[in-house]
Image (tube, rainbow, N blue to C red):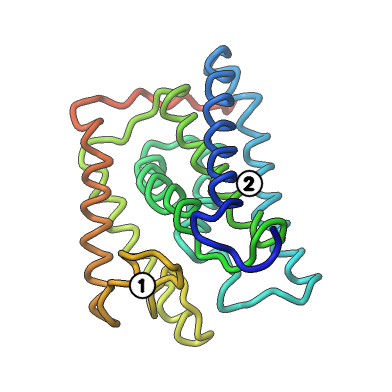
Amino acid sequence: MSGEFQLFGFSHIITIIIITLAIVFGLHWLQTYDRRHLQQRLHPWLVALIVLQLFGYRIIFILQNDFKLDYDLPLHLCGLSEMLLIIYLLHPSQKIFDVLYYFILSGAALGPIIPDLHQNFPSVRYFAMFVPHALMVFIMLYLIIVQKMKPSSGSYWKAFKTLNLWAIVVAPINYFWEGNYLYLRQPPAVNFGPVKWLPPWPWYLLVLELFFLLLYRVAYYPFATVKSPVVVSTEK
């Protein structure tokens, strides 16, 4: 199955099925444990996993002479989400969760479905694409289903503003290193109809802005009338 990655090809579909089953069984298993116990025992391990894959894959790319400054820094939305997840799991905060909820259930959830990937299984980049995204989606669903976390009122605006502030930070980095972080210079190079139909730069950025604002609003709707629980700190 090595070679060029094919969107919705055999390896892609099998990977999505495996990820889905792993998340479902993992969440079912975690629901048998006490929430406080999980916060104290599981969260440090989740942090370790995020840190391991955040640095591990990039170290492998460097050793393989395949690390690219214009592509492999954790400056995409998912890279930012990983760093925020580390902070949240160590120091739970409703404000951080409000941003993470939208970032992960948009960017990280869309990543495995329409990945910006060119190397097929079993390349390192294949795992570097699917494992971090799957882990983030799993953790977010765990926080919602097991830890009973909910986004606060109007939080989608907070996430949308944070997304745009991050774009302002990333834009000059793209300019100096000729990168395409956050896809600010061109759409992702994926063979997917809706992406290919986007207008040229800079107009496609406006389309993406409207798309994510609508997506965040839809993601907020199920919790619009639900109060968030008080976050339980694990600090002694």
Which residue is label 1 attached to?
168
Q: Nearer the viewer, residue 199 or 80?
A: 199
Q: Nearer the viewer, residue 60 or 96?
A: 60
Q: Is residue 103 above or below residue 35?
A: below
Q: What amino acid is labelled 1 in the image?
A: Ile
Q: What amino acid is labelled 2 in the image?
A: Ile
Residue 162 location (% of width, % of height)? 33, 57
* Marker count (numbered): 2
Which residue lies at the image location 54% right of the left edge and 52% below the top edge? 83
Residue 189 location (% of width, % of height)? 46, 73
Question: Is tag 2's residue or tag 1's residue first in the polypeptide sequence?
Answer: 2
Which residue lies at the image location 41% right of the left edge and 29% below the top edge? 144
Look at the image and tell me whether residue 133 can be seen. yes
Secondary structure of residue under mark 2: helix
Q: Specify the farthest residue to the right.
A: 63
Specify the label residue 112 is tagged with.
none
Which residue is label 2 attached to?
50
Which residue lies at the image location 57% right of the left edge and 28% below the top edge? 235
The image quadrant where one finds the N terminus is: bottom right
Q: Is residue 122 above or below residue 32?
A: below
Task: Sort mark 2 into few (<14), some (14-19) or many (20+) by Cα contacts within 10 Å.
Answer: many
Q: Is residue 154 above or below residue 213?
A: above
Q: Quadrant of residue 96?
A: top left
Look at the image and tell me whether residue 91 can be seen. no
Q: Is residue 96 above or below residue 190?
A: above
Residue 105 location (% of width, % of height)? 39, 44
Task: Sort mark 1 into few (<14), some (14-19) or many (20+) by Cα contacts within 10 Å.
Answer: few
Secondary structure of residue under mark 1: helix
Residue 204 location (% of width, % of height)? 27, 74
